[in-house]
């Protein structure tokens, strides 16, 4: 079966995309968006956004490996403790996980991804000469320019079934037929 995308020679299989999608729509709020009259359109939009995110994760992961940036289990543990504190305790966090139908393993994976992306954003901002006092918005702007350039220069192929990659925005856009 053709992959959903290939990023710098690394395949993102349709099975991986489907698995990630299935995990997303366990959240009742997201599930509601993909049913009903607008469900099919919303499902396709969500799938394209998810695939774009997985592509970004591959590019970020490549940069992280090249620059020895990582996230340890201790880093994730600390972020989970911070989350427990911010929601008012472990029972509240467990309740939130139940509501979203998210497992602790899923939470750990999501937090690990977020921490890694944040560290790469910080590294790219520092390499661009931004001071350590730069705002998240300033860092995000530098990261977006870097990502856009990386998407243009990297070999990224998206299965046309899902659309086409717009390197400027990092989005996967639907392919609209031009047939008359």
Image (spheres, rainbow, N blue to C red):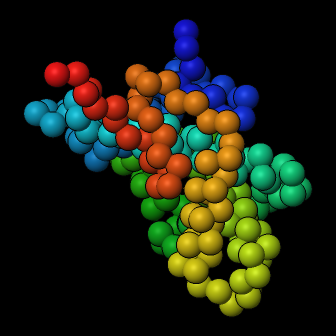
> Which one is nearer the viewer's eye here, 87 or 53?
53
Going 50% across and 55% down the picture, which residue do you hit?
A: 168
Residue 119: image quadrant is: bottom right
Residue 108 visible, this angle: no
Seen as rendered, the residue at the extreme front is: 180
Q: Position of residue 36 (x, y in %)?
A: 13, 33
> Which one is nearer the viewer's eye here, 173 or 138?
173
> Which one is nearer the viewer's eye here, 100 or 41?
41
Q: Is residue 70 left or right of residue 54?
A: right
Seen as rendered, the residue at the extreme left is: 37
Going 52% across and 21% down the picture, which residue do you hit?
A: 14
Residue 79: image quadrant is: bottom right
Q: Position of residue 144 (x, y in %)?
A: 57, 64
Q: Position of residue 127 (x, y in %)?
A: 79, 73
Vertical order, 170 against 91 (above or below): above
Going 40% across and 22% down the picture, which residue do you hit?
A: 161
Vertical order, 30 against 143 (above or below): above
Looking at the rendering, in which quadrant would you find the N terminus? top right
Vertical order, 180 against 38 (above or below): above
Q: Is residue 173 left or right of residue 130?
A: left
> Which one is nearer the viewer's eye here, 58 or 168?
168
Q: Is residue 167 left or right of residue 112?
A: left
Looking at the rendering, in which quadrant would you find the C terminus? top left
The number of discs equals 0
Residue 144 visible, this angle: yes
Vertical order, 101 against 72 (above or below): above
Q: Is residue 16 left or right of residue 99?
A: right
Going 48% across and 40% down the picture, which residue do you hit?
A: 165
Q: Position of residue 174 (x, y in %)?
A: 34, 35
């Amino acid at each position: 079966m053709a992959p959903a995308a290939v990023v710098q020679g690394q395949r993102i299989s349709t099975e991986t995309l489907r698995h990630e999608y299935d995990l997303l729509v366990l959240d009742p709020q997201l599930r509601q968006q993909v049913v009903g009259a607008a469900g099919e359109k919303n499902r396709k939009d969500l799938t394209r956004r998810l695939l774009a995110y997985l592509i970004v994760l591959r590019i970020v992961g490549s940069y992280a490996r090249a620059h020895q940036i990582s996230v340890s289990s201790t880093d994730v543990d600390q972020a989970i403790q911070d989350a427990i504190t911010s929601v008012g305790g472990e029972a509240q966090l467990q309740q939130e996980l139940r509501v979203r139908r998210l497992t602790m393993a899923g939470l750990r994976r999501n937090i690990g991804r977020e921490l890694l992306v944040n560290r790469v954003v910080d590294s790219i901002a520092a390499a661009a000469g931004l001071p350590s006092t730069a705002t998240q918005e300033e860092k995000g702007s530098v990261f977006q320019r870097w990502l856009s350039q990386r998407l243009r220069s990297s070999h990224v192929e998206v299965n046309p079934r899902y659309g086409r990659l717009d390197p400027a925005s990092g989005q996967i856009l639907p392919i609209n037929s031009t047939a008359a």
